[in-house]
Image (spheres, rainbow, N blue to C red):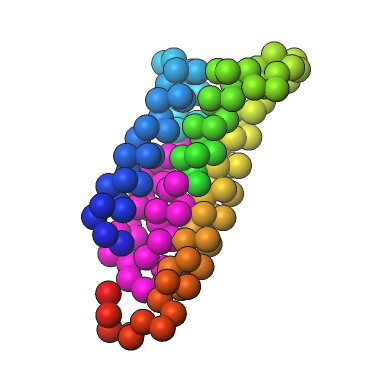
């Protein structure tokens, strides 16, 4: 993975933390809902030197995880479709959201591997 791709993915992961901090303020809700972003940052750090078809797995994981976390929190802030006020149990979104975000990240990693593999078709084995 190139440095530009890694830097952009890391920036998106960091930016996705802002809606979490806006919604929860200081407190334990922050840590639970920031956990998928920490996992995404760890995946980026551990898989930064991948080559071949799997080189887009870490950015795909990070992008989809960050989008799920930020999207869930922004939907709450904007009350899209009654996300915040539609039900007495709507706050349970923040209990489930980290699991959904990690699932979305796995989907993104799979799509990243698939796209990297497709981009490598017809390319000689030793070529970057």
Instruction: State the residue lying farthest toward the right.
Output: 87
Q: Quadrant of the N terminus?
A: bottom left
Predominant secondary structure, magenta span: helix
Horizontally, is 4 left or right of 89 in the view? left
**Residue 123 occupies which quadrant of the picture?**
bottom left
Identify whether 27 is placed above or below 117.
Answer: above
What percent of the width, then of the height, locates residue 82? 70, 18
- Whether residue 91 can be seen here: no
Q: Quadrant of the C terminus?
A: bottom left
Residue drawn at (35%, 52%) of the image: 44
88 lies above or below 43: above
Q: Is residue 41 located in the magenta-colored stretch of the structure? A: yes
Q: Indicate the position of residue 79 as horizontal and vertical percent values.
A: 63, 18
Q: Is residue 79 magenta?
A: no
In the rendered view, does 77 fall on the left or right side of 18?
right
Question: Which residue lies at the image location 46% right of the left edge and 52% below the top edge?
Answer: 61
Residue 83 in which image quadrant: top right
Q: Position of residue 113 (x, y in %)?
A: 47, 66
How many discs appear?
0
Magenta segment: 35-63
Could you tell me residue 91's position as x and y percent?
65, 21
- Determine the residue positioned at 49% across, 32% down: 70
Viewer-proximal residue, 26 or 7? 7
At x 37%, y 32%, the residue is 15
Q: Quadrant of residue 41?
A: top left
Q: Is residue 17 visible?
A: yes
Task: Answer with left or right where residue 11 lies relative to residue 91.
Answer: left
Relative to 100, residue 16 above or below: above
């Amino acid at each position: 993975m190139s440095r530009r791709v890694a830097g952009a993915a890391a920036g998106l992961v960091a930016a996705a933390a802002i809606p979490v901090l806006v919604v929860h303020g200081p407190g334990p809700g922050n840590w639970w809902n920031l956990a998928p972003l920490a996992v995404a940052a760890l995946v980026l750090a551990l898989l930064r030197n991948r080559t071949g078809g799997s080189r887009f797995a870490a950015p795909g994981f990070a992008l989809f995880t960050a989008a799920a976390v930020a999207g869930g929190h922004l939907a709450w802030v904007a009350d899209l479709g009654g996300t915040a006020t539609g039900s007495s149990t709507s706050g349970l979104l923040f209990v489930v959201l980290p699991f959904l975000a990690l699932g979305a990240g796995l989907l993104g990693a799979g799509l990243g591997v698939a796209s990297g593999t497709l981009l490598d078709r017809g390319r000689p084995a030793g070529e970057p």
